[in-house]
Image: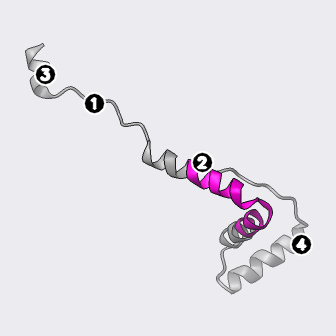
Amino acid sequence: MKLSVVQVKFETSKYQALKRYAAKKEISLEQELNETLNRLYRKLVPTDVREYIEEGERMEKTSKPKAPRQPSEEQNKTE
């Protein structure tokens, strides 16, 4: 699965406060943002489109190309 980088502009003072209080509560901002994006994805993307994407991801995982085989030592000796 490929990942994309998402950039958002946010007021610096609010971001600094957010980082500070998240750290105090031992909360990962990246994890929280990921969960929020996933909720938005489920809310906004139609079910049939999500199923199509998930099916493509499953197929990609199961049909990864195999690395080319290296000739064995016996094959190298006979050539």
Mark 4 against mark 1, which lies toward the viewer? 1
Q: Is residue 68 magenta?
A: no
- Tell me the element at label 4: helix
Dot 1 amino acid type: Arg
Quarter of the view holding residue 33: bottom right
Give SS at disc 2. Answer: loop
Residue under label 2, please give it. Answer: 2
Q: Which residue is mark 4?
A: 13
* Residue 39 rendering spot, x and y as whole percentages: 73, 70
- Residue closest to the far front: 48
Pointer 2 or 4: first along the chain: 2
Q: CA distance from mark 4 to mark 1?
A: 56 Å
The magenta stretch is: 37-56
Mark 3 → mark 2, Cα distance in angstroms: 38 Å
Q: Which mark is residue 69?
A: 1
For label 2, count other residues whose C-alpha is less than 10 Å away and answer few (under 14), some (14-19) or many (20+): few
Would residue 53 be found to the left or right of residue 69 on screen? right
Q: Amino acid at mark 2?
A: Lys
